[in-house]
Every structure is written in structure tokens, then in C-alpha cells.
Image (spheres, rainbow, N blue to C red):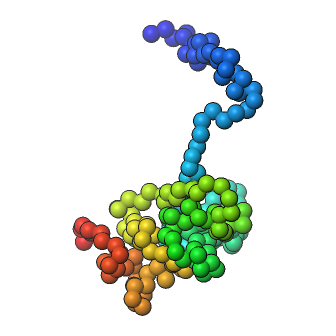
Amino acid sequence: MDQNRDEIKEYLDAHYIGAVESCWHMYEFSMHAESPLVYCLPVHLEDEQTVYFNAEDDINEVLERGGSRITCLTAWFEANRKYEAARTVTYQNAPRAWVYNDKKKEWGPRQHGPPAVGRMWFVSPSQGERFDLRMLLTVVKCPTSFPSLRTVDGIVHNTFKQVCIASSKVRIHFEGP
């Protein structure tokens, strides 16, 4: 194998853009379609949302930031309190008729455009409570908070696993202790 071989230069030298593709680039047409829009929906336990900060930030200021407490999921709980129409869909199906405004940190009814698809973050079964929460979010409509999500037939359960077992909506086979 030749040590002096520059594969990147070889690729660039061999790369060819024809007349049609060059015009497409010049007029700034999109090269491929991305439809439908896919929302990545976070799944986190209460007060365990992801918080972003820089190494030089004061940790107390980071913890006091109000924006880090409101997430897409907690904003969905608020939308269920605020809008009656929001109570008819599950969290994963919310983007079909609702739009999350990241700057305002709130959900609102979709006014125009094609419906989007919601994809919740992957959660491994080994993550226990978070996995159970994700399972509940696929079937439960109208949760207004984490405690309301843990409520079945007027009984507030301590864990999401207990809710999954008590609920007739979710059938999960649990293995292990």
C-alpha cells in the first residue's frame, strides 16, 4: 500500500457534477425530500431531564434556569391542561395535530403544513422506570403531570411499573425480580 496516496484528493479529482446537477445547485433546489417531518420526543422521569451547560458555568445558575425545567414532555402535560383537544391524543401522536415551539417551550395546535410524525427516544428495557414511562406514553391520553400519569382508577401508584401492571391498557411481560 502506497503511503503517499491521498485518497481525498483522488475522490475530489474524480468527482463529477453534470450540467443538470450544477443548475440544480445554482438555483438552490433541494436535493432530496424529507417528508414527513419527524419530531424527536424526549422521554425522561420527573426532574431528570437533560440539562446542557458549559464547563465554566456556575452550577447553581444552571440549576436555577427555568428553561431547563420545561421540556417537550412537560410542555405536553401543560397542553393537556390548557387545550381540551390535546387530551384526545397520546404523546407520541401529538405532532400529527400539534406543533412544539422550542423557543416558547409550548405546544400549540397545528395551523398549516403537513402533519408530522412523533418518534420517542429509544429507552432500553434495562432502564426500568424510564422504559415503563415510555410504554405508558404510547397509550395514555390526557396526562397533565407525572403524578396524573401514575394514577389508575383514582389510585396514585408509586412507580410506572405498578401503573403498567394495574392498567388494563398496557400489557407488558416483565422478566426478572
Q: Is residue 58 above or below residue 35?
A: below
Residue at the bottom extreme, as displayed: 154
Q: Residue at x 56, y 49 (%)?
A: 36
Total numbered labels? 0
Q: Is residue 138 above or below residue 116?
A: below
Res 35 visible: yes
Pick the quarter of the image with the C terminus: bottom left
Q: Position of residue 70 (x, y in %)?
A: 63, 70
Q: Position of residue 65 (x, y in %)?
A: 70, 70
Instruction: Kindly indicate the quadrant of the structure image that contains residue 109.
Output: bottom right
Q: Residue at x 37, y 68 (%)?
A: 128
Q: Residue at x 54, y 11 (%)?
A: 5
Q: Is residue 109 left or right of residue 124?
A: right
Q: Which of 76 and 67 lies nearest the eye of the viewer?
A: 76
Q: Is residue 30 above or below residue 36?
A: above
Q: Position of residue 101 (x, y in %)?
A: 68, 63
Res 78 visible: no
Q: Position of residue 7 (x, y in %)?
A: 55, 16
Pick the quarter of the image with the N terminus: top left
Q: Residue at x 59, y 40 (%)?
A: 33
Residue at the left extreme, as displayed: 176
Residue at the right extreme, as displayed: 27
Q: Which of 76 and 126 lies nearest the eye of the viewer?
A: 76
